[in-house]
Image (spheres, grey):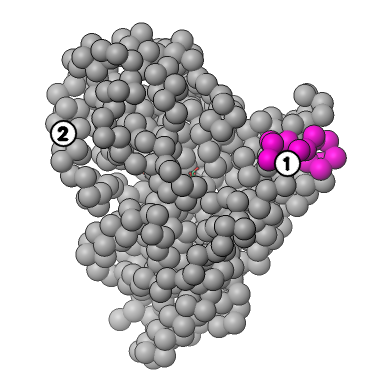
Amino acid sequence: MCKFRVFFISTPAIGNLVPIVEFAQRLVHHDPRFSATILIISLSQRPIVNSYIQSRSSTYSNINFIHLPPVDSPSPDQYQSAVGYISLVSQKHRPHVKDEIAKLQQTESDSARVCALFVDMFTTAMIDVANELNIPCYLYFASPVTFLGLMLHLPVIDVQLATEFIESDNELIVPKDPATELIIPGFANPLPPKVLPTSVLKRRSDGYSWFLYHTRRYVETKGVVVNTYRELEKYAITSVEATTTVPRIFPVGPVLDLAGPIEWHPERDQQDRIMKWLNNQPRSSVVFLCFGSMGSLGRSQLREIAIGLERSGFRFLWSIREPPKGKLDLPGEYASVEEILPEGFLNRTAEIGLVCGWVPQVTILANQAIGGFVSHCGWNSILESLWYGVPIATWPIYAEQQMNAFELVAELGLAVEIRVDYRSESGDMVLAEELERGIKRLMDGDDEVRRKVKEMSEKSRMAVMENGSSCASLTSLIENLTSGIS
Ligand SMILES: O=c1ccn([C@@H]2O[C@H](COP(=O)(O)OP(=O)(O)O[C@H]3O[C@H](CO)[C@@H](O)[C@H](O)[C@H]3O)[C@@H](O)[C@H]2O)c(=O)[nH]1
């Protein structure tokens, strides 16, 4: 009989929601005294969230999924960024979350006690609900500890950003002295400012104010559960614990959905076509290019990629998404990619390459044909690639990805660099020859990176085994969650 109930409230984004659901599943599987309820915020612009939940509700019968009622959209003058919008929507959901938890508390059998509400990096307004209901609150962090370190340090470096950088409306801040470097908890090396997230470099934006809001709230929680593992971010974990006011860190990862979209994404036909093609390719011969659930690139950049790929001569699997129309929309699928790629490209490369839209990424990374991954460096993608021992070439686009790329290349030596500071919104362009060079190093050269990635792959698997570091961390989290509850 279950004794302890935990609640989760996630940002409506695949990158946050999937690792939260997987963690809930791991928790209830690891300790059957637990039951988990996931409260879902829906956004009409993100139907993928609903199809994901629908599929997972039938597979994960021991998790309770509850869709929260819709709220009025914030008016456009209240936000400029997606972070702002999501933070406001989350705030508006506070009464609903309180109602749902209170309702369940009343109907719960006597033996089950609510022992935690887990918020994520952008749903921290729910800490108020936990306080009102007297429930301990924890943060589930789907990004690396290095990013947690930056967030916790933001109020401190804010002064440095204000005095040592040049600011202008809507522009990214730049250091007055180009040699400026930042000392950030979690990074052994000084951080070049150009790898900071756009929301931080747009210091006058609502995104930055929200970052400051959320980070102040992180320290109100009882602990931060991070989707990472000690063997991967050893320095970062020790450094952030020692130099910030973080409550306790529980590294429980990698927490991955290894079945992935092949099970829950609606586009089954395309996925079957991809896997059939991949199964016919030689071992480690294919370079895979994919830029995350929210990543898309402009047409001229796509043409450069096509030229670079063709010149490299390697077999390739390339996921191309159409840029979204609105700020909150996700990328879509091109009706025809032929017209956006160089003339004759698809015909010339028909024997060696496949161009597609959304892909079942984790299943692809598991395939023996994949030899390297050109990735936007979202944290889930990094963990998945390390799990399967596939080396990455870094091409970050948005969010904290530039920092993740810097961590992989400069801190951990676990990736080949294409760029660590690419930012599409500033009109940046990776030229065909840069990509060609990067792909050749990824697929042909850098045995040291490949060796380290294989080693880390083994460590990631060990971490989640019985007696592994993340398993031990989960046990100690459970002790924390249940202590004082009879
Ligand atoms: O065509 C696709 C694209 C993505 N995915 C999957 O979608 C997830 C994407 O997650 P991630 O790699 O973390 O990228 P984002 O979706 O961009 O995730 C957001 O959330 C992450 C966790 O906080 C951050 O690290 C990222 O920077 C942020 O953009 C992964 O599991 C991928 O396997 C697919 O299966 N097929």
Up/down of 34 relative to 440, above or below: below
Specify whether 366 is left or right of 422: left
Q: Is residue 338 visible?
A: yes
Whether residue 87 sits left or right of residue 433 in the image: it is right
Asked whether residue 114 is drawn in magenta, I would say no
Front of the two marks 2 and 1? 1
Q: Amino acid at mark 1?
A: Asp
Q: Quadrant of residue 129?
A: bottom right
Could you tell me residue 196's position as x and y percent?
64, 37
Asked if the stretch drawn in magenta spans residue 161, the answer is yes
Element assignment for label 1: loop
Secondary structure of the residue carrying tag 2 is helix
Q: What number is the disc on residue 169?
A: 1
- The residue located at (40%, 66%) in the rendering is 40
Residue in the image at 16% along x and 34% along y: 273
Tag 2: amino acid: Arg
Percent coordinates x, y for residue 243 in the rendering: 73, 49
Name the residue furthest right: 163
Mark number for residue 366? none
Residue 294 percent location from the top left of the image = 43, 42
Look at mark 2 in the image and give the residue it sits on.
273
Is 14 left or right of 187, judged from the image as shown? left
Lower sequence index among marks 2 and 1: 1
Left or right of residue 200: residue 58: left
Q: Over which residues does the magenta segment extend?
A: 160-173
